[in-house]
Amino acid sequence: MTGAVVIGVGQTAYEAAKPHQAIPEMVLEAVERALGDARIGMEEVDAVVTASVDLWDGRTASNIQVTEVVGAVMKPEARVAGDGLLAAIHAAMTVAAGAYGTVLVAAHCKMSEGQHWACSNWAVDPICQQPLGLDFLSAAGLQARAYQARHGPGARHWARVVEKNTRSARASPLAPRGPARSAAEVMASPMIADPLRALDAAPATDGACVLILASPERAKSLGCNRAVALLGAGYACEPHYLGDRDLTATEALAAASRRAYAMAGIERPLGEVQVVECSEAFSYQELLWCEGLGLCGPGEGARLLEDGITVPGGRLPVNPSGGMLGGSPFVVAGLARLAEAVLQVRGEAAGRQVAGVRRAIAHGTHGPAGQHHSVVVVGA
Amino acid sequence: MPQPLLRVRASLDLTWHYAAGSHFTRFFEALRDDGLILALRCPACRRVYLPPRPVCGNCFRRMEEWVPVGPQGTLRAFTVVHFPFLDPTTGQPRPVPFGMGLIQLDGADTTLNHYLDETDLGRLELGLRVEAVLREPRQGDMGDIRLFRVLRP
Amino acid sequence: MSEPLVFPGSITIPFSYAAGAAASRFLVALRDERRILGTRCSSCKKVLVPARSFCAGCWEDTGDWIEVGPEGALVSWTTVHLPLPHLPPPPVTLGLLRLDGADTDLLHAIGGDSRRLERGLRLRPVWREARSGSLLDIAHFAPIT
Amino acid sequence: MKWRRRVAVIGTGQTEHTRKRDDVSQQELVREAARRALADAEMTPGDIDAVVLANMELFEGRALPELWCAEGAAGAGKPVLKIATGGTSGTSGAIAGALQVASGMFDTVLVVGFEKQSEGQTAAGMALTDPMWDRHVASAAIGNFALSISQYMAERGVTQEQAAKVAVKARRNAARNPYAHLQQPGLTVEQVLASSVLAWPIHMLEMCPTSDGACALVYAAEEVARRRCPRPAWVRAAATRHDHPYIGDLDRRLVTMRTLRDAAREAYAQAGVTEPLEQFDVAEIYEPVSYAELAWYEALGFCKEGEAGRLIEDGVTAMDGQLPVNPSGGVLSTNPIGASGVIRTAEAALQLHGKGGQRQVPGARLALVTGYGVYAWSDVLILSSDPG
């Protein structure tokens, strides 16, 4: 047990662009939904953990613009850079430490406002990789080819992930409006970072996600009867140079999963968990992340999909919300996965509910070719 | 022969397009179209905020009551800046010296940091009355308030 | 819904990053001697390329400096087709290659027709005439024909 | 203190802070501090469960630099996260690391704050404020402080000479600190007031430098701390307050400084401090400009409103005074922004470890640490030789 529970969840709709909303207005929408969901007022929130990245927002100290809407005026706030799920794990630790009874976690990003691939070139080391032009797109292209060469599943298998997730996204009221994509459409879309095509990459989206964590005692005193426990949490970081890493293995994800499962008392996730929400910024990554999450052996991610295990209605649906391919922005994606996992456990995942969910896995990642991973197990 | 130590240069030169959102849109349209400076009042603590924004930070209450403020105000703080730092929006050093102040516009509770038309320290003091000098023609962005003029008796 | 008000903005700032002593020696070797250097971890004995002062895994200092390559084998590659401000005009192929004698892969540009690339393909560096002590002193790696 | 378990600083390490480090990359700078902290704690990388980094990435034009620099903090393969909250990044990183150990999730956490300001344009980075509102006038820390100081001088009667005395104390203290960036043992008030005016009334010699530097500290849970460290520096309090997003929102910022006041009130209550000037043996506070230290004296309850000038003139906060403030030379002498908050925390801890060398305050057992960021973000930590 991590010693923290989720008592409130709030997400904006995820859209290709939100030109009518400034970032504080967008985040306020998610904050108000989370407070309403938790049935508490902002005065009940003891502390705030924000997640944002200055260069994505195009400004310094990018969390200062949301200070008022996340209720951090004259309150403790810490900004964890990177991914919203990582911010949630840190928030859970501050609750478990006994420092705060309730913590509001808020992640935001508007990918539509900046040049997100160009910005990601500034997230790789400036000496040996940035000058060559490496960014999150080309890093994924290198990983996709290495994965295919090592394990076999290629464009045809990846395209079916896009088909599955964009179809699932249609059932989610929060996903961007847009058609489901057939595998054929994916394989006909223009090549952007060979072997990855345009529809193999998650669409750039705008959105915000807010969760409210609490200690079990505080949740009880607040009269919350729908608290979902964070049963386990883990995160880990791989070396930075792509050439130092085995891009087909997922050492950091495996380490993060082991820690989270050990805490949650899970031996075999495939049998003991009923839904997974993972952060697949690219189609092939859902297969690779399933392997890293221990749902199957190395290289067997594609077979899970072919055998119908990870499809809606399958033995272990992955990304019934549509995941990142369905529309979920940088920074927010990991926290949105946790929000979805909580809704699944509560049985409140409108349009995308998996039957009989007692335990769910949420996964977040950031960095080139999934360099950093966070895993959380939630349960009733 | 000492080991040469190299540096790798990189120039960040990227663009963003920032959505103003409903609050700033109303502010800049009123400024452009009517030369009005609009602030927002918190329904709970009655504090009038500039710039307008979704909620009052102290009360966490949405604000809907728009209040025209200024164009005159009182100088609450001032300085004359001499050090030429690089202005990230132009990529050039900002010309110095320039006078700068915190101006509490009549009707507002918060202050606004902006340029002053005065760079002689001897002629600046707290409490001076100042007035916004608007750009003509106005274009609907923060450049529409060019600077504040010190009102000399 | 009226046309939303959106402000264009740009950030223009020059940066200058210290490569540090180890990377400087690596870059100088490219510039002055057209040699590619790795360093060996004193603990796990891996030859790390590009050369660096310590091994991330063992967190031990590296010791010997070892020339690697210049030839190597292609491990993975991607051809970027999008026009991006930090890249030459597309298509641009980036690759990971294992230089002879190295225990890690070097990231670099790959020249030639990307359709003919395959795993294990033998490559050699194509040096620029005017070199400035940068990884780009190697224009790209080209297939050995 | 109501934390689930006790946490202590058992090791610290920092680089020789300076204007420009050409011999190391950001990653290697982090490693330099991390190695020294691990050596001080007599630990190996394998003894560290998790890493917290602190850095204001965009000042050096980076995004997610923790993904590259984690290797410098022995973070490859480990849990790593970065805290970035302006000037308080270091103290907020220190608080984050302590809370992670207190949570029980980790028994040992390595916190490393770092900044290589020679690689970027700090003032330009700071001026990247709200693009709609004040980015075209934003004038970074120097401009913002100059504005607030004109209010502070008017309301509290602080003089330029008193402020200059703060700078003199800082740079003289720094002369006894081998890690400080600016060491000026013979600095005089006259020299400070004769130095060029950056933005009235701030003179060059009373404003913090931009520095390249890193600072690391090792946290351990109680049982590990007792086993490994003869005099653990126990974390007895930690408090943070943030405030409105615009400088103009903050009513007479230096005069009121409500965030520091409220954070100190909470921290003092956690640690049972009622008379700060008497009870604290040493303080490491975050003063980017001379006048700020005077304002902090009042907000921290060292004296009543308007008495800060007397405190500095009477030498109450000098090395031989009742409460030595910033034996390290403070931010005025050393400011690698992401590291500065960790430096404050580490300098307080090494005083309690008895490792202050020439800047050791004899018998120090209770230390106050503050962090300051952006317009008015405040952190307060209290470290003690007594676990409480």
Image: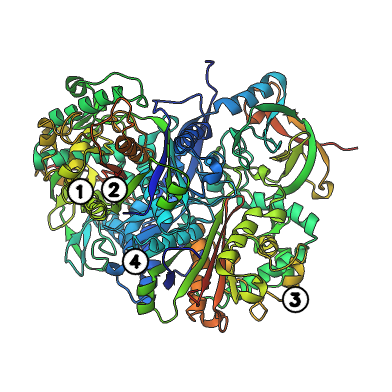
State the SS at label 4.
loop
Please name the residue that numbered disc 3 is placed on.
Answer: D314
Question: Compared with residue D152, is residue D11 higher up or lower down, i.e. above or below?
Answer: below
State the SS at label 1.
loop
Q: Determine the residue located farthest toward the top in the rendered image.
A: C1
Please name the residue that numbered disc 1 is placed on.
Answer: A250
- Calculate the distance from the C-alpha at mark 3 to the C-alpha at mark 2: 55 Å
Question: Compared with residue A183, is residue D218 higher up or lower down, i.e. above or below?
Answer: below
Left or right of A249 in this view: C54: right
Three-letter code for the amino acid on which mark 2 is drawn: His
Question: Is residue A71 in sight in this rendering?
Answer: no
State the SS at label 3.
loop
Please name the residue that numbered disc 2 is placed on.
Answer: A373
Left or right of B14 in this view: D192: right
Question: Is residue B68 in sight in this rendering?
Answer: yes
Tell me the mark number nearer the camera, choosing from 3 and 4.
4
Three-letter code for the amino acid on which mark 1 is drawn: Thr
Q: Give the chain of mark 4.
A: D
Give the residue displayed 52% in from the left and 71% down from the top: D383
Left or right of A95 in this view: C95: left
Both on one chain, marks 2 and 1?
yes
How packed is label 2: few (under 14 Cα within 10 Å), some, or many (20 or more)? many
Tell me the mark number nearer the camera, choosing from 2 and 4.
4
Please name the residue that numbered disc 4 is placed on.
Answer: D107
- Calculate the distance from the C-alpha at mark 3 to the C-alpha at mark 1: 62 Å
Q: Give the chain of mark 3.
A: D
